[in-house]
């Protein structure tokens, strides 16, 4: 199926290019921080790299996190540097290759970090509304050709779709599982064109008439409205999902327990209390994707995300074309076995060794 291509949309990099870009980004950051008098004795080996989800753009995400990470570095006595990438693929590669020590993750990436890459959950983010999660949404233009959800579902081949990459919980997985799957719709066949990009890019594409409808989420739409009020005023939400758990901060278990506890204590205290310092920290959180702070959490709280991933894989196996029913059943049995194994890994990841 054809895909829309614009300069600000997803850039698909070959593995070698991804590695080169990530390494260059980290080294550039290291040069500035290690020259900082506060870390005069720091070496490259002391640096803790912090992986950042590409929620806006790579540069934008890095800039947003830098104030908090500078303060975290002071608390830990080691530089903490943002490693921001252009795609989920790039961040997963960095996790696989042990080039990320701490990270802010959600959905499948968070589950994989604990079950496959030797990390544990330190904390879960929270937002001012106090809800334990956010919702996936489907957006369209106000006063556009799409009036409601039924228009989208009953007219195959009529509309173009903006969506997230497949590891994105709200950009792909949950809409497939809770909206398109129950309607027996395969999005790759139902829509005449697809734009695969970040939430900000797909929201802009809908607002500017470049695609008809797009997946997004309630948290990122609030952020979008603050940054692009005119474009946000052109959007309407025509569907929303059940609550999806908020993202988490994870850290490699290979680091000393004392260092992990310091990192956790820093997050728990950040933006709490009264006075100028706490007010400044709350302002940083507000700029940082509209967060309100961090709550205690462990790796076991990722079970709902793992269940969503398993349900999506089941749906794909049940709706796919198979040579025989025995082959389909074998796939379902394998998925069930893998799910049970991952649940055990999450339980083990809930306890600090």
Image: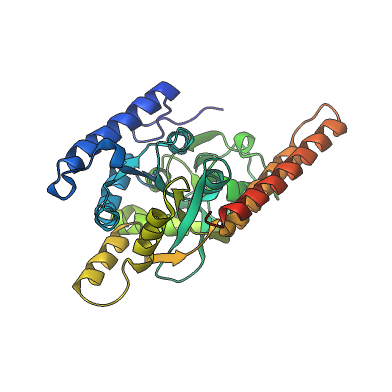
The quarter of the displayed image where residue 260 is located:
bottom left
The N terminus sits in image quarter: top right
- Quick check: can you spot residue 14? no
- Quick check: can you spot residue 45? yes
Residue sitting at 44 percent across and 24 percent down? 15
Q: Is residue 135 left or right of residue 77?
A: right
Q: Is residue 112 left or right of residue 235?
A: right
Q: Residue furthest left?
A: 37
Residue sitting at 82 percent across and 26 percent down? 323
Q: Nearer the viewer, residue 260 or 131?
A: 260
Residue 29 location in percent, x, y? 24, 39
Looking at the image, how many numbered discs can be counted on the residues? 0
Residue sitting at 56 percent across and 34 percent down? 192
Q: Residue furthest bottom?
A: 274
Q: Is residue 206 left or right of residue 281?
A: right
Q: Residue 203, relative to residue 242: is it above or below?
A: above
């Amino acid at each position: 199926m054809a895909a829309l291509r614009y300069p600000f949309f997803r850039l698909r990099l070959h593995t070698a290019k991804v590695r080169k870009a990530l390494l260059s980004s980290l080294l550039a950051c290291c040069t500035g921080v290690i020259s900082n008098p506060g870390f005069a004795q720091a070496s490259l080996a002391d640096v803790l790299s912090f992986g950042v989800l590409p929620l806006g753009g790579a540069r934008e995400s890095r800039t947003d996190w830098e104030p908090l990470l500078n303060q975290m570095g002071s608390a830990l006595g080691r530089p903490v540097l943002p490693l921001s990438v252009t795609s989920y693929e790039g961040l997963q590669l960095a996790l696989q290759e042990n080039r990320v020590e701490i990270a802010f993750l959600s959905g499948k990436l968070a589950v994989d970090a604990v079950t496959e890459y030797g990390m544990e959950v330190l904390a879960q983010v929270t937002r001012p509304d106090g809800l334990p999660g956010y919702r996936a949404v489907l957006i369209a233009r106000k006063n556009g050709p799409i009036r409601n959800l039924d228009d989208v579902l009953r007219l195959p081949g009529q509309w173009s779709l903006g969506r997230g990459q497949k590891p994105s919980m709200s950009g792909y997985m949950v809409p497939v599982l809770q909206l398109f799957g129950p309607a027996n719709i395969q999005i790759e066949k139902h829509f005449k064109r697809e734009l695969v990009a970040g939430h900000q890019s797909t929201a802009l594409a809908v607002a500017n008439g470049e695609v008809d409808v797009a997946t997004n989420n309630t948290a990122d739409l609030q952020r979008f409205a603050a940054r692009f009020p005119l474009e946000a005023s052109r959007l309407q939400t025509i569907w929303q999902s059940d609550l999806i758990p908020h993202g988490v901060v994870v850290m490699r278990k290979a680091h000393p327990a004392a260092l992990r506890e310091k990192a956790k204590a820093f997050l728990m205290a950040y933006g709490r209390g009264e006075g100028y310092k706490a007010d400044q920290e709350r302002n940083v959180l507000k700029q940082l994707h509209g967060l309100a702070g961090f709550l205690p959490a462990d790796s076991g709280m990722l079970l709902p995300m793992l269940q969503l991933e398993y349900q999506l894989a089941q749906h794909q196996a049940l709706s796919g074309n198979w040579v025989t029913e025995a082959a389909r059943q074998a796939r379902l049995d394998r998925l069930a076995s893998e799910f049970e194994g991952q649940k055990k890994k999450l339980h083990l990841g809930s306890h600090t060794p």
